[in-house]
Image (cartoon, helix red, strand yellow):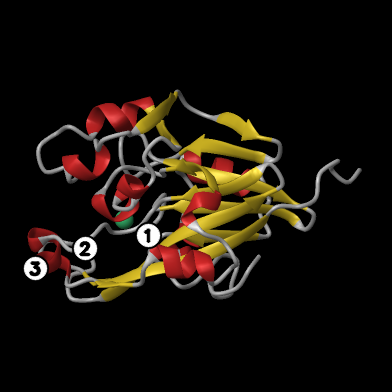
Amino acid sequence: MPRPAYSSPAVHPLHLADVVYPEGHPRYGETGPVFAFLVAHPDGSVLVDTGIGPPHELIDRLYKPVRYPLEEALAGIGLAPADVRLIINTHLHFDHCGGNQFFPGRPILVQRREHESSGAPGYTLPDWVDFPGANYQLLDGDGDLLPGLRVVATRHTPGHQSVVVDTDNGAIVIAGQATETAAEFEAEQEDSSILKLKSFRPVRVLFSHDFATWPQGLASAQL
Ligand SMILES: [Zn+2]
């Protein structure tokens, strides 16, 4: 296979919070991580999700989050928020779009169906989606965004999307919350969107709320 004409992107998981799942959640009582991801692409840094936003009475009471600032996570890989060229939201639940408000003017790519759904009562925190300077660019289904970087519509919310990154070592998939865990991803044999992600034959699949990756490993290092 010919090597691509650009240097290979790298994918950095950014551990931005730990939350305790509230009553009514399938993982009630468990503590789980919240990850965002930085794709160091030759055309610019791409931030996939932005974590939980600033302190918020309801969120803090329900989820008891411990936050690890995005700025520090980026600094850990030698970047600053100003280096982020564009943002992709897998979806607009509060734990995925909470930091969008710190990027006024920056393009934020989200599925049109997701953006339309986000206004429903209780769906998310509307102020964390619509903020002064918000610059959403709406996508309709699968598509290439940059060389070697594409989005694939997946399940979880009406307009959830996952991100597929071509690297010299093979495809890395940022599944987001298409499944909650790596184990669920492994077990899923029927959902067409998960099968589509598997069809890229990824060398690594990363999840928003699981330290584990697929096929196996921990989401702690550059990939
Ligand atoms: Zn989530």
Kind of element beneath mark 3: helix
Q: Nearer the viewer, mark 1 or mark 3?
A: 3
The reply to whether discs 2 and 3 touch (Cβ–Cβ < 8 Å) is no
Kind of element beneath mark 2: loop
The reply to whether discs 1 and 2 touch (Cβ–Cβ < 8 Å) is yes
Q: Is residue 169 visible?
A: yes
Residue 134 is left or right of residue 178, and the answer is left
- Please identify the quarter of the rendering in which residue 51 is found: bottom left
Which residue occupies 68% across, 41% down?
Answer: 43
Image quadrant holding the C terminus, namely: bottom right
Kind of element beneath mark 1: loop
From the top left corner, tell me how far across and down residue 217 is, in percent.
58, 75
Q: Work out whether mark 1 precedes mark 3 in sequence or the reverse, and give the earlier one.
A: 3
Q: Nearer the viewer, residue 119 or 134?
A: 134
Q: Amino acid at mark 1?
A: Glu
Which residue is labeled 1 in the image?
180
Q: Residues within 10 Å of mark 3 (few under 14, many from 20)?
A: few
From the top left corner, tell me how far across and down residue 22 is, in percent.
14, 67
Image quadrant holding the N terminus, namely: top right
- Please identify the quarter of the rendering in which residue 53 is found: bottom left
Indicate if the residue with disc 3 has its beta carbon within 8 Å of ligand 1: no
Which residue is labeled 2 in the image?
26
Q: Work out whether mark 1 precedes mark 2 in sequence or the reverse, and give the earlier one.
A: 2
Ligand 1's quadrant is: bottom left
- Label at residue 61: 3
Q: Nearer the viewer, mark 2 or mark 3?
A: 3
Tell me how far mark 1 sits from mark 2, CA to CA. 10 Å
Indicate whether 140 appears above or below 214.
Answer: above
Which residue occupies 64% across, 47% down?
Answer: 165
Q: Amino acid at mark 2?
A: Pro
Q: Amino acid at mark 3?
A: Arg
